[in-house]
Amino acid sequence: MDTDIKTYYVRQSAGGARSAAEEALDNLRRSLDSSDTAADGHHGWASAAALKRCASAWEDHMVDLGRQMNTMADHLHTTARSYDTTDAQARDAFIRLQHGLADFGGN
């Protein structure tokens, strides 16, 4: 079975994952503004404190997801480099083999 990995697409996926993570993190703070406003407007209420805790937990969760996506992007880039390196090594080995065979009168 022959597998042909298009590293361009692997890198493109890595870039997409990184962009999505950055955009999500950029939008995160604005998405929680209304929670802060609501909690601040009801200072002292149990629901205000609960809302603050919920918003904080959600922010932590989203930041963690963003980090995971960035890690995934890094791994995809590393994988693409590894495939390219392996392919180049295989090509070089094949060329050396062909030259070696030619030296011995082979094809």
Image: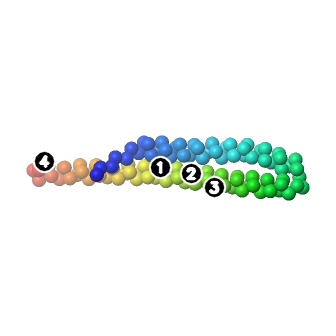
For this orientation, the residue located farthest to the left is 105
Which comes sooner in the sequence, label 1 or label 3? 3
Which numbered circle lies on residue 13? Answer: none
Estimate the spatial distance between the alpha carbons at disc 1 and disc 2, rounded to whole Å.
12 Å
Residue at the disc numbered 2: 69
Residue at the disc numbered 3: 64
Residue 5's x, y, as percent?
37, 47
Estimate the spatial distance between the alpha carbons at disc 4 and disc 3, rounded to whole Å.
57 Å
Residue at the disc numbered 4: 107
Element under disc 4: loop
**On the rendered structure, is 57 left or right of 84?**
right
Question: Which residue corresponds to the image point at 52% horizontal and 43% vertical from the top-left?
Answer: 15
Element under disc 1: helix
Question: Which residue corresponds to the image point at 24% horizontal and 51% vertical from the top-left?
Answer: 94
Of marks 4 and 3, the one in the foreground: 3
Q: Is residue 72 above or below residue 9?
A: below
Three-letter amino acid code at disc 3? Asp
Most foreground residue, 88 or 49: 49
Of marks 2 and 4, the one in the foreground: 2
Three-letter amino acid code at disc 2? Met
Estimate the spatial distance between the alpha carbons at disc 1 and disc 3, rounded to whole Å.
20 Å
Three-letter amino acid code at disc 4? Asn
Which numbered circle lies on residue 77? Answer: 1
For this orientation, the residue located farthest to the front is 47
Estimate the spatial distance between the alpha carbons at disc 4 and disc 1, rounded to whole Å.
38 Å
Q: Is residue 54 above or below residue 15?
A: below
Residue 16's x, y, as percent?
53, 43
